[in-house]
Amino acid sequence: MRSIANCFCLSKAKNPPGFEEHTILASETTFNVNEVEALYILFEELSSSIVDDGRIHKEEFLLALFNCSSKKNILAERLFELFDLKRNGVIEFGEFVRSLSIFHPDAPEADKIAFTVKEVKTLNELYRKLGSTLVDDGFLNRMFDMFDFKHDGVIDFGEFVRSMSIFHPDTPQEEKAIFAFKLYDIWQTGFIEKEEVKEMIVEFLNESNLILSDDIIEAIIDKTFEEADSDKDGKIDIEEWKDLAVRRPTLLRNMTIPYLK
């Protein structure tokens, strides 16, 4: 009898802290049981990448999204805070499911709109505090537009999945290059211009707490355009960008999230 009880205790101990039954989560979110079970498989993989304790730590979250577990990233930290509903420094499975449920096609429109307005405003404020010259209202709106295929002011689950697919390891490099080009084309002119490149470099330096003189920044820009601007018109078009990405594949290194495979 005691051995049976011990087996039962061991079985129960397999559930990590914060574990919630799939049926309960399905009843309290817009996911069905099968979808919750699929999310649990993903959650198990993410939560064991560094510390195998059944919870997603911030380092694991950074590693999954940005392939980096230690570099400070204000956007990643804000996303982590959104998932960490209990504010205890880790993401449990219930928090993981409830946070993702806002992107489900059947989630109430009012919830999506409230989430959208709140988080865009918050991100704006965070980047303003950093003194960012790149991430202004227009850039944030462009980032949102790239996910909001229907242009209805919200990102549903289908749009979220399709947008994230660009970061899959098996996605063709050309598709990644096109997505990156649209992201870097800040002014939406169909070209990447020198001033846009300068803004991106300054933003990177600000986030990395690095300092370079204006002369060095200008030299970096000149070298980039010397290599990429094949027709020497002072702009980089999409074909020139794709050619550059072929020659310098490290340009698209951040366009792949290994844990999506």
Image: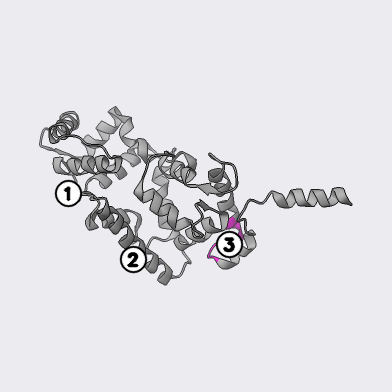
x, y percent for residue 135: 25, 51
x, y percent for residue 120: 32, 60
Q: Which residues are magenta?
A: 29-36
Numbered disc 2: secondary structure: helix
| Residue behind mark 3 | 32
Amino acid bearing label 1: Thr
Amino acid bearing label 3: Asn
How far apart, in angstroms, are the residues tagged by discs 1 and 3?
43 Å
Amino acid bearing label 2: Val
**Category of crowding for the residue at label 1, using alpha-carbon neighbours closer than 10 angstroms: few (below 14), some (14–19), many (at least 20):** few
Task: Determine if residue 163 is in view.
Answer: no
Q: Earlier in the sequence, mark 1 or mark 3?
A: 3
Numbered disc 1: secondary structure: loop
Quadrant of the image occupied by residue 226: top left
Left or right, 57 with reference to 127: right
Magenta span has 30?
yes
| Residue behind mark 1 | 189
| Residue behind mark 2 | 117
